Image: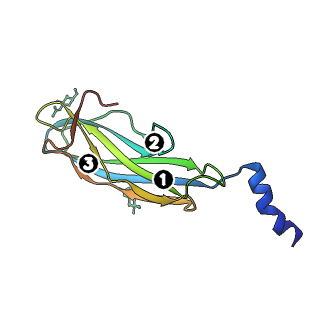
Amino acid sequence: MMLGSLLPIIFLIGGIGAKTNFKVNGTFTCDYDAWCFFVTLWEEDTSESWNDVIDRMGTKCVFGRHSYNYQLDGTEYEDGPFGDEFYEIFLTVRHNCTSYGKRELRRETTFESVKTPVVYITWNKQLTGDIGVLVDEFV
Ligand SMILES: *[C@@H]1O[C@H](CO)[C@@H](O)[C@H](O)[C@H]1NC(C)=O
Ligand SMILES: *[C@@H]1O[C@H](CO)[C@@H](O)[C@H](O)[C@H]1NC(C)=O
């Protein structure tokens, strides 16, 4: 009884927040025989001017195959009792499965409760077709 009522206070003082593990996978497909991509999992930070990288793969090049199964895995920590209730999560992929140059595609932002211990996201994308914005670099 006594301990039960004290626990929330201890948590507040200790600043121990919840954490959420994000497990992402999916398949990128491309009609070209040689192509490279750089995929990043982001948390959009509206209070800061930058976004947090949760996880990313280095530049991955694929030769002689038209699809690649990727996986990302990362953990975010709740800011504390006064933090946001939701993580704003999105993914980007920069790639050169194009007729010219490199392009970036972005997955729509999803809102995930900070109370969810594990979030599963699957993002499959056909990269062919010169869609997305032109970028200079993979990173
Ligand atoms: C993508 O870049 C790699 C490495 O530079 C190159 O080998 C490949 O031909 C490029 N693919 C396309 C479709 O431009
Ligand atoms: C991707 O993750 C889902 C769970 O969200 C799982 O069912 C599926 O088997 C995974 N696919 C691959 C290729 O790992």
Name the quarter showing ligand 1: top left
Q: Three-letter amino acid code at disc 1?
A: Phe
Q: Secondary structure at mark 3?
A: strand
Residue assigned mark 1:
22
Label 2 CB, ligand 2: below 8 Å? no
Q: Position of residue 40 (x, y in %)?
A: 38, 41
Which label was assigned to residue 55? 2
Q: Amino acid at mark 3?
A: Phe
Quadrant position of residue 18: bottom right
Residue beneath the point at 47% across and 59% down: 112
* The N terminus: image quadrant: bottom right
Q: Residue at x 33, y 33 (%)?
A: 59
Q: Which of 73 and 103 lies nearest the eye of the viewer?
A: 103
- The answer for how far apart the CA atoms under marks 1 and 2 are is 9 Å
Q: CA distance from mark 3 to mark 2?
A: 17 Å
Q: Is mark 3 within 8 Å of ligand 2?
A: no
Near-viewer residue (12 or 95): 12
Q: Position of residue 77 (x, y in %)?
A: 59, 49
Q: Is residue 28 left or right of residue 114?
A: left
| Identity, as a three-letter code, of the amino acid under mark 2 | Asp
Residue named by callout 3: 28
Q: Are marks 1 and 2 in contact (CB under 8 Å)?
A: yes
Sequence-first disc among 3 and 1 = 1
